[in-house]
Image (tube, rainbow, N blue to C red):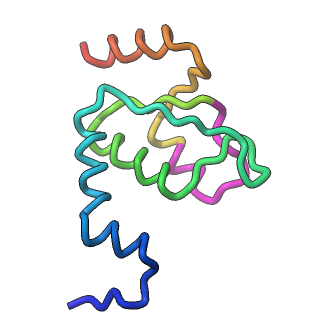
Amino acid sequence: MQDYHELKEQALAKIVNDLIRKHFAKIEKSDAIYVANYEKKEIAGYIGGNTFLEMGKAFDVNIPIFLANELPMQISYREELLAMKPVIVGQDWEKMENCIASWKK
């Protein structure tokens, strides 16, 4: 039995409503995911914890991962991100559509 009394309301809502699993179910139904990894916290191409989790789920179910920008150099989980083989497309939607089409073959 877990005691969630010390959690903030947002974390408790995610647990009670099973929001992470529901979000993963949406990813599983997707043709691809697009990560808008713009600069944040003075890190170009930033990818935070939630996005890393989403990318991991997409990779797990063999869904292509597209990025707006290059992966950041200064994050500790860069190697894991590289291993997911994301494709950098910027905002080239045609490139992304072509990749998705070839992925489905």
**Is 63 on the left or on the right of 52, as rendered?**
left
| 68 up-or-down from 8: above or below | above
Residue drawn where x is 30% and y is 91% of the image: 3
Q: Quadrant of the N terminus?
A: bottom left
Question: Does the magenta stretch mainly form a helix, a strand or a loop?
Answer: loop
Assess whether residue 74 is covered by the magenta stretch: yes
Q: Which of 50/59 is in front?
A: 50
User: Which of the image's four quarters has the C terminus?
Assistant: top left
Looking at the image, residue 69 sits to the left or right of residue 101; the answer is right
**Percent coordinates x, y for residue 31 in the rendering:** 30, 26
The answer to which image quadrant residue 2 occupies is bottom left
Where residue 102 sits in the image (x, y, percent)? 34, 12
Magenta segment: 69-81
85 sits to left or right of 90: left
Instruction: Give above or below for 75 relative to 92.
Output: below
Horizontal arrangement in the rendering, residue 81 relative to residue 40 (left or right) = left
Q: Residue at x 40, y 72 (%)?
A: 11
The residue located at (41%, 9%) in the rendering is 98
Residue furthest left in the image: 1
Q: Is residue 100 magenta?
A: no
Front residue of 64/11: it is: 11
Question: In the image, is residue 57 above or below residue 101?
Answer: below
Question: Residue 44: x, y in percent?
Answer: 74, 42
Which residue is drawn at the image coordinates 28% and 49% (left, top)?
24
